Amino acid sequence: MTKVLLVGQDKGGVGKTLISRGLAEVIAGAPLIEVDSSQRMLELGKRVKFFQTRADREAIERTGGAAARAEFDPVIDAIASASLPTIVDIGANTAASLLPVIADLTEDFAAAGIEFGVLVVTTAEPGALAWVPKLLSIAEPFTGMRFVIENRVEGEIDPKMLSKVAAGATVACLMNQVMDEQAAAILQAGGLASIAKLDAKALHAKFGIAQGSRIRRDLTRVRLDVMQSVRLVAEWLVT
Ligand SMILES: Nc1ncnc2c1ncn2[C@@H]1O[C@H](COP(=O)(O)OP(=O)(O)O)[C@@H](O)[C@H]1O
Ligand SMILES: [Mg+2]
């Protein structure tokens, strides 16, 4: 069986792509599938297969016509042809419609040798939290493992609330990462993969020794924190 991890949350900006990048750092060479309105993980080059979702997707779906039904065909085919543990970063407003399509194909995926896990990322924002039980319950029938990552970028989630919404899933946590604006820009542009390659001398020349060193220290910590947050998920994916 080939394991495929579906990373989802219909709210945007909660850290799905950052966490997918963390998994890509932990599992060297693992292929990724990115389903989004625009491609983000450019730094990973050919490791990523990108499938564009249309901005008018919701309107198309309401029609229920042929276009809506065929929308995810290329994504489904790419998942079914996975032969290595694969990370699927499902962009905003998409998991709630993609997961049921996968659920309908449970037997076909099993025949193709694909075993699924799901990772729902959430912040403390109520709109994001509300998606957690919904997405977990859609995924429950066809996933062997379910994970939730609490991203504390908007503060800690009340532990009782978290264990309620994440019932049946393995929970991990990513702390809020404090960094300079320049560090955030480097992270935004080059993802986590660029951090291990940062050149200290070039940073000192550009930002001065104090800020340059801080940027490198902060980004190194961000990379390690994100990798740490996905450790259990990665263990499932590769064993
Ligand atoms: N724990 C965190 N601390 C600091 N910044 C974060 C954290 N989680 C996410 N971010 C930042 O928030 C922004 C949105 O994250 P992203 O992974 O693109 O979200 P999504 O893929 O869910 O839309 C990015 O700039 C990302 O680096
Ligand atoms: Mg994203």
Image: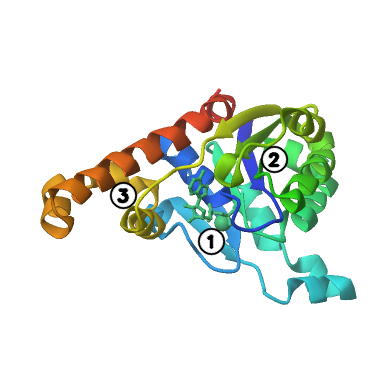
Residue beneath label 3, please? 194
Q: Which quarter of the rendered picture does the N terminus lie within?
A: top right
Task: Tell me which numbered mark, 2 or 1, is placed earlier along the sequence.
Answer: 1
Return the residue nearer the eye: 223 or 57: 223
Question: Where 153 sits versus 146, above or below?
Answer: below
The image quadrant of residue 219 is top left
Task: Calculate the distance from the C-alpha at mark 2 to the C-alpha at mark 3.
Answer: 35 Å
Q: Amino acid at mark 3?
A: Ser
For label 2, the SS is loop
Q: Amino acid at mark 1?
A: Phe
Return the residue nearer the eye: 136 or 66: 136
For label 3, the SS is helix
Residue beneath label 1, please? 50
Q: Which mark is residue 112?
A: 2
- Identify the residue at image location x=80%, y=53%: 101
Residue 27 in sight: no
Residue 84 rendering spot, x and y as whole percentages: 52, 37
Q: Is residue 48 left or right of residue 181?
A: right
